[in-house]
């Protein structure tokens, strides 16, 4: 049984969550943002270091090598377009690892791209 006190305790978090879901009528989120990087190839994992450096795992854009997976999966493509990118606080980009495996179920026009996806920062070690 949910007591009136429990409802009162839940009211604030629920109100905050609903407030976060409010979007502008045009479909864009309210508030200003800052673009820190563009032209990323399917970014999947982000880690922000204490010094403001952003590390990004990019799944890539698959590749031109076609291959077939048993049904129910469609013909697909693979390549080595995945990478890990470092973006310094001043915007300088450095590729830390590239030519990582990337695969697209359904070929190059697919939204289902798999590749580098997660990063972990332990202390100062990526």
Image: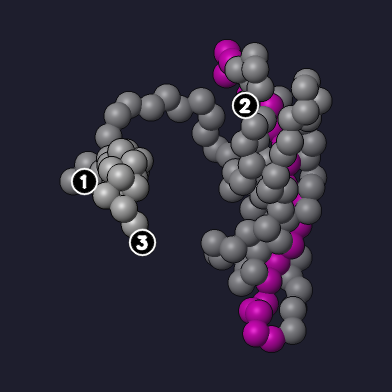
Give the mark nearest the N terminus, 2 or 3: 3
Q: Residue at x 68, y 71 (%)?
A: 76
Query: Could you tell me residue 31's position as x and y percent?
Result: 29, 29
Above or below, 52 relative to 97: above
Q: Tell me if 109 is positioned left or right of 98 in this view.
A: left
- Reply yes or no: does residue 81 show up in magenta: yes
Q: Quadrant of residue 33?
A: top left
Which image quadrant for residue 8?
A: top left
Q: Residue at x 71, y 61 (%)?
A: 103
Residue at (74% x, 78% y) in the render: 68
**Left or right, residue 90 beside residue 1:** right
- Mark seen at residue 26: 1
2, 34: nearer the viewer: 2
Which residue is under mark 3?
1
Q: Is residue 68 magenta?
A: no
Spatial CA span between label 3 and label 1: 41 Å
- Which residue was labeled with disc 2? 48
């Amino acid at each position: 049984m949910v007591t009136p006190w429990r409802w009162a305790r839940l009211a604030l978090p629920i109100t905050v969550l609903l407030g976060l879901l409010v979007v502008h009528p045009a479909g864009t989120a309210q508030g200003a943002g800052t673009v820190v990087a563009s032209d990323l190839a399917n970014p999947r994992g982000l880690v922000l270091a204490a010094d403001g450096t952003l590390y990004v795992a990019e799944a890539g854009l698959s590749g031109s090598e076609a291959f077939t997976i048993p049904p129910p999966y469609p013909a697909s493509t693979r390549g080595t377009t995945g990478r890990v990118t470092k973006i310094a606080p001043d915007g300088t980009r450095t590729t830390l690892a590239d030519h990582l495996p990337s695969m697209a179920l359904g070929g190059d026009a697919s939204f289902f791209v798999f590749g580098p996806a997660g990063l972990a920062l332990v202390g100062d070690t990526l």
